[in-house]
Structures are given as C-alpha cells and as structure tokens.
Image (tube, helix red, strand yellow):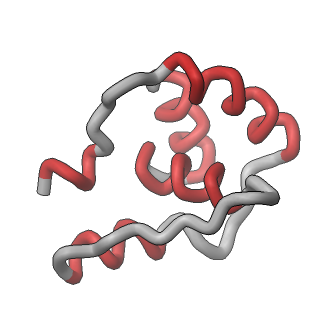
Amino acid sequence: MSRIKEIGGCYGKSPTQVALNWLTSQENVVAIPGAKNASQAKEFAGALGWSLTREEVEELRPLSKEIKGIKMPIEES
C-alpha cells in the first residue's frame, strides 16, 4: 500500500484512484466500481483522465498479488 500511496502522491490521486487506474490499464480487465453515493462516484471518477506510466503498471503488478483482503479507503465511507 505504501507504494500505491507514493505513486498517488505524484499525481495528486488517492490510493483508490491509483488502484482503479491500474485496473483499467490491464488489457483484460474492465473495472466496474459500485458507487453508493455521490462522494464515491466522484472518488471513482478521479481514476479517469490520466494514466500510470508503463513502468508503474509493471511495478504494481507483482505487488498486487501480495495485498490480500485490504479495504480500499472508499469502502469505509
């Protein structure tokens, strides 16, 4: 999670937005986040309109396998 937060800081994005952006950068994934309110929809929308670098995408791929059962900050709202 610390690397996701670090990357997000470079873009002014939250960990949730970095994670969603990473998912959409995968060739075989369509992310469909379920927003329960306007605040969540706004948070999810922040994953759009920018892109992680190819290096960041590749760096996060093996890290994603290490993270188990985490709650994204948006789920706590």
Q: Position of residue 5 (x, y in %)?
A: 47, 33
Q: Is residue 53 left or right of residue 4?
A: right
**Image-quadrant location for residue 28:** bottom right
Quarter of the image for residue 35 reads bottom left
User: Is 61 left or right of 8, judged from the image as shown?
Assistant: right
Residue furthest to the left: 77
Question: Looking at the figure, which quarter contains the N terminus?
Answer: top left
Residue at 26% from the left image edge and 70% from the top image edge: 40
Which residue occupies the extreme bottom position in the image?
38
Image position of 10 (left or right of 69) = right
- Which residue is the extreme one toward the right? 54
| Between 33 and 37, the one nearer to me in the picture | 33
Specify the quadrant that holds the C terminus: bottom left
- Residue at left offset 34%, top offset 76%: 42
Residue at 53% in and 33% down: 4
Q: Percent position (x, y) of residue 62?
A: 69, 22
Image mark count: 0
Q: Position of residue 14 (x, y in %)?
A: 42, 49
- Against 39, residue 10 (above or below) is above
Q: Residue furthest front?
A: 28
Residue displayed at 55% across by 65% down: 31
Could you tell whether 3 is left or right of 44 in the image?
right
Q: Is residue 66 above or below residue 23?
A: above
